[in-house]
Amino acid sequence: MTDAAQGKSPDNPWPVRSVAMMVKDWIDRLGTVWVEGQIAQLNVRPNSSTAYITLRDPAADMSLQITCPRDLVHNAPVKLAEGTQVIMHGRPSFFVGRGSFSLRVNQIRAVGIGELLARIDRLRKLLDAEGLFDPRLKRPIPFLPNTIGLITGRASAAERDVVSVAEARWPAVRFAVRNTTVQGPTAVAQIVAALRQLDDDAAVDVIVLARGGGSVEDLLPFSDETLCREIAKCSTPVVSAIGHEPDNPLCDLVADVRAATPTDAAKRVVPDAEAEQALVTELRHRSARALRNWVHREQHTLSQLRSRPVLAQPLAALAARSAEVERARATARRDITRLIDAETKGVEHLSARLATLGPAATLARGYAVVQVASGTMPVLRSTADAPAGTRLRIRVADGAVTTVSEGSDSAGSDSEGSNEAH
């Protein structure tokens, strides 16, 4: 059985010491490395020359165990404490006695404020390019939220400010408070977990992320990429109230509303009951005044309309027209009467003339009309029409007589006398 086959089957296992030594030899070949992170835990024992540090990645739930000489911690360029951002240089090391892995550090450097700000600025440009700061993505805050989710430090001034100011403005306000660490290596993970929990709660209408002021290092978790992206994914509106007015972490730009302070956040999220009541009272007065003014305007308009002659004396126009009609009727009646009188006189005159010129008047004066008494009884116009023996009808003023013609009387001296005799 060769060494190559050893450890490949339960019949030929490696002893613990051999495996530990092989792991150590492999890790020792990795060489040195520079690593950056936040100090999550620092343990410097008084009776030990070695310091033990837990270095945490602020953007992920991962950490490394660091060992270094005690003097390296005391002589570090900055005071090392939990939450300090550092860069370390060391070699991976495997301790065969305990089977543990650590990074043996020989240099510690602090991440300067300038470098931190430069990194935040690079991340800001990246998130801006992805559209996470787009104002069109900002969600409106409800006028009166049912429940306010509050993420803040335990028993912090920020929590007292938000709760006290909100309750003073609207006594019936309700909070769902999630206390987390707000600085240090564990802050991001806890805040993200609380944010997800509140976002999943259907009763929560708005989430407030509140923290008091602090240094750039203290506010680093609120410029973390993981937290910014989690805020952007929330379906519930998020209000960022981190630090004071000059502080401007990246979560302020991603959040739907940026409040200058926690107190300002409470004022933005909860309406002021007294101010709203005063506004309602003012609106009622304004509406009543507007209604009265409208009524007065309409009354004035009606008064103007009623004062016009057509409405003030509606029968005056009819009376005037009636008088005109009566005058026209009288004129027409007078003209008709005059015309009738004139026509009556004309008829009487014509009647008189007709009576004078008519056959009856002529007969009355002694004339007679002689007709041949046969057929159509034509009027006798010539003696030749009445030879002897012709029956004649002679019409006089009071009647007619019948006679027989004896023929023409040629001895007559004049025709007029002859006609008169007939």
Image (cartoon, rainbow, N blue to C red):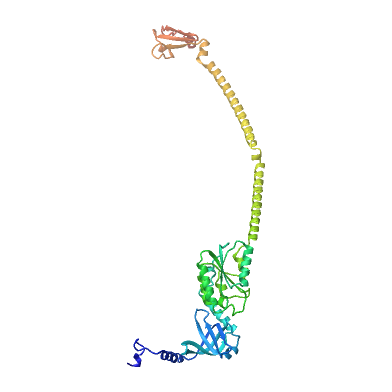
Quadrant the N terminus occupies: bottom left
The image quarter in which residue 186 lies: bottom right
The image quarter in which residue 320 lies: top right
Asked whether, in this view, residue 4 is left or right of residue 35, the answer is left
Residue 197 screen position, x and y as percent: 51, 69
Frontmost residue, 124 versus 159: 159
Residue 121 screen position, x and y as percent: 56, 79
Asked whether, in this view, residue 414 is left or right of residue 46, the answer is left
Q: Is residue 246 above or below residue 363?
A: below
Residue 369 screen position, x and y as percent: 47, 12
Q: Is residue 187 above or below residue 408?
A: below
Q: Is residue 104 among what the camera can see?
A: yes
Q: Residue furthest bottom?
A: 2
Frontmost residue, 75 versus 411: 75
Residue at position x 63%, y 56% in the image = 280
**What is the total number of numbered labels drawn onto the structure image?**
0
